[in-house]
Image (cartoon, rainbow, N blue to C red):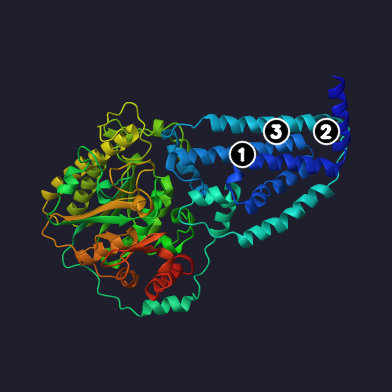
Amino acid sequence: MNIIKKLRKKITEVTKNDLAAVFLAALILFIQTFFVFSLWKAGPDLILPNCFMFIPLYMIAYLLIRRHTICYGIISVIQFFLYYLNLYVFSSRGTPVQFGDIYCISDALSVAGNYPLVFNSDVLLVLLGVVILNALIWFLFAQTEYKRFSSYKKSGIKFPLLFIAASIPILAATVLSVTAPPFSLTEYTSKTGFPLAIFSEYLHSIVRPPQGYTKEQAENVLSGYTETSVGVSEPINIIVIMNESLADYSLLGETGFPQDPMPYYHSLEKNCVKGRLLVSVFGGSTCNTEFEFLTGSSLAFLPPSSLPYNQYMNDGIHTICKDEALSGYTKTAIHPYFAGEWRRNSNYPIMGFDDFISGEDFSENYVKGEYEDIAYMGLEFADFGSDLEYVRKFISDKECYRKILEKQDESNANGKPSFIFAVTIQNHGSYQYEDFEAAEYTDDDIFNQYLTLTSISDSALEYLLAELSERDEKTVVVMFGDHQPGIDVSLASADMSGINKYITPYIMWANFDMEWDVPEITSPNFLSLYLKKNIGIPLTKWDQVRLNAAEGFPAVSCEYAAAAGDGSIVDTSSIIGTDAFKDYQFVQYEMMFDN
């Protein structure tokens, strides 16, 4: 006891000195930050900047509260929350937390119930370390702060301000030296350190004009093209289906599956064309593929981790719905889930849709859940009506296709062709439902559940095309996957690294005699262009700008591009400076940010 008393006396003498106290607290926080975010994996020159992301926050809190014990506890809660959030997101989608995720918190919460919480030895170790360091802070400061604040004595402010001032040049030097995050952020986050990676993403999320851009130059590019006449010789119904997490692994190599998950899709030959779609996202961010198809804009010209649906939407953005050639069409968007997901209820009117049918509109039996905010509507509240067909707890693809047929028939009965854009939900992750009976394709239960879902999607497609084949009205169907599922995949002879993680299938099909001319590999931003070109919808000036770029590289994503002819793969950064892609980038920037 005497030793502890003497130790406490010595500590009290030290912590009464403001400089010593502030330095001691900052040192312990430095150790905790290093430990919580595994900064030994980061470059040595980045360890200090990562820690100084939190020390100024700590000092600001101390200037307001004047108690190290409370301030340290606040920062500890923030750090552990960020650590666990990053771990949880990585376990569910295979990528770390990104700055852009802040724009889709409600969407993330709405599907969070699909993924189990993570609790393992690493989490326990980090939590234990944080608790121990907080206990140390209390041991060092509690007695001094009790005596100090019992008489409302205020400590000085010059030393906390000194620490804040010292942080400024460190952070400034880091900002100047840190490079833009790459397309794939996993390795970048590990090497840079999570706190600094998030900060870097924020700095590089600010969209600046392309080098050499002026509004006049963008307008000159457009003036070099001539508007073609509007209208098609014979109205054709258009159905576009973006199928949630649809992947066709046979496009990548030998799968080794004992049976084909998509036999009907692979059997289609007449009046159709099939190929590979190069997308910019993996395991999530569905809205980015959707944005590229509907607008023709490319994410290659936007900052990494951008979410245009949540960040950059405005009335000036051109979409396929705004084409004058489709002015006589009824334009309907369908998504069998909550309308607020990815802000579709506000974005679709901006994009030119006349009507939006969400999951809440599928059945007259739908009763709104207990919570109105989508952030609280997990799967347990996603019952949109007892008369609907569900796969797991999502409305099935087949039910979605029934709604498509209903809306097309309704439009045609009124003497109008229809343009329908549907985003399915059936195959959404995760793939760990205990009451779901999965076929055996591999030794991995999660992968088996996913592949079983794709086989159900395949049967639903067969239903849709059979129904359309019986109708007299001419109809084309475009279906593609938005991204691959965020799961570990092992195939017999296919390499699942690099570009292969970003390949999904696409198909264009017609219920009448049709010869298609579409590259075997393309990307969402060009897919709508090829759709219009093949069915005779006149191309706008914006279309012609894109067509000029696509002639050299018909597929382009954030990181990869495929060349025409041999399909050779290059880094997207190597083609952005070419004349055709510079024109493309200038016109896109003018349309999105300078109109």
> Callout 3 environment at 10 Å: few (<14), some (14 to 19), or many (20+)?
some
Q: Is residue 374 rendered to the left or right of residue 3? A: left
SS class, disc 1: helix
SS class, disc 2: helix
- Can the viewer see residue 99? no
Query: 392 or 492: which is nearer to us?
Result: 492
The structure residue drawn at horizontal position 45% and vertical position 43%, both measured from the top left corner, is: 107
Q: Is residue 476 above or below residue 283?
A: below
Q: Amino acid at mark 1?
A: Val
Q: Quadrant of the N terminus?
A: top right
The residue carrying mark 3 is: 133
Q: Is residue 358 above or below residue 2?
A: below
Instruction: Indicate the position of residue 95 as horizontal and vertical percent values.
Output: 46, 46
Please tell me which of labels 1 and 2 falls first in the chain.
Answer: 1
The structure residue drawn at horizontal position 16% and vertical position 64%, both measured from the top left corner, is: 234
Query: 13 or 67: which is nearer to us?
Result: 13
Query: 43 or 91: which is nearer to us?
Result: 43
Query: In the rendered structure, are the residues bearing label 1 and label 2 in contact, judged by CB atoms less than 8 Å apart?
Result: no
- Can the viewer see residue 142? yes
The residue carrying mark 2 is: 145
Q: Alpha-carbon distance for marks 1 and 2?
A: 27 Å
Q: Is residue 470 rendered to the left or right of residue 37? A: left
Please tell me which of labels 3 and 2 falls first in the chain.
Answer: 3
Name which quarter of the figure residue 316 lies in. bottom left
Q: Nearer the viewer, mark 1 or mark 2?
A: 1
The residue carrying mark 1 is: 36
SS class, disc 3: helix
Instruction: Indicate the position of residue 452 as horizontal and vertical percent values.
Output: 26, 36
